Amino acid sequence: MNIESVLTELMTLREQVAGVTNSAVASVDGLLVTHDASDVRPEVLAAMAAVALGLGKSTGAEVGMGELREVITRCAGGHIVVYAVGQTNLLVVLGDEGLDINRLHLYSRPAVTRLGELLAA
């Protein structure tokens, strides 16, 4: 696994999508792989994102809606979006209130594919 390439994906996502403030890649067990985060605790973010992803996967399976794409949480101060990266990893993106969710999805879905390839290598 090339951590620098994973980090480059995170920084590119921040550059491509206005409103992205922090991001991290972690295992589904909540262990931090790497991050582009400055004003949050990345280890805690990774652990909490893993919980959100697990709950989303379980809920989707229970109601028969297929494979989970992402979990979106909207707060007074912005957004938390958690994407499944294969079966063993996740991408979590934080955005401010001005985050364009549609643009984030447009750029993050190909990034998730690339991250999956990088993490599998």
Image: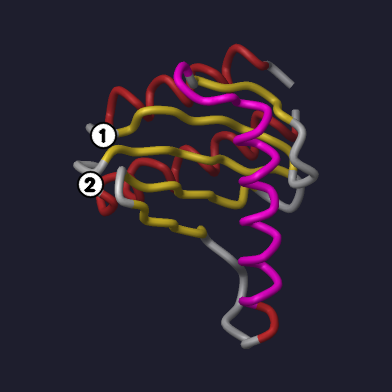
Place residue 61 in its image quadrant. bottom right
Question: Is the residue under label 1 in contact with that under label 2 (CB below 8 Å)?
Answer: yes
The mark total stands at: 2
The residue drawn where x is 22% and y is 32% is 18
The quadrant in which the C terminus is found is: top right
Identity of the residue furthest to the top in this view: 4
69 above or below 77?
below
73 above or below 28?
below
Neighbours of disc 2 within 10 Å: few (<14), some (14-19), many (20+): some
- How far is mark 2 from mark 1, CA to CA? 7 Å
56 drawn magenta: yes
What secondary structure predominates along the stretch shown in magenta? helix
- Residue 80 at x, y percent in the picture: 44, 47
- Residue 20 at x, y percent in the picture: 33, 32
> Which residues, given as a range, are shown in magenta?
38-60
Identity of the residue furthest to the bottom in this view: 63
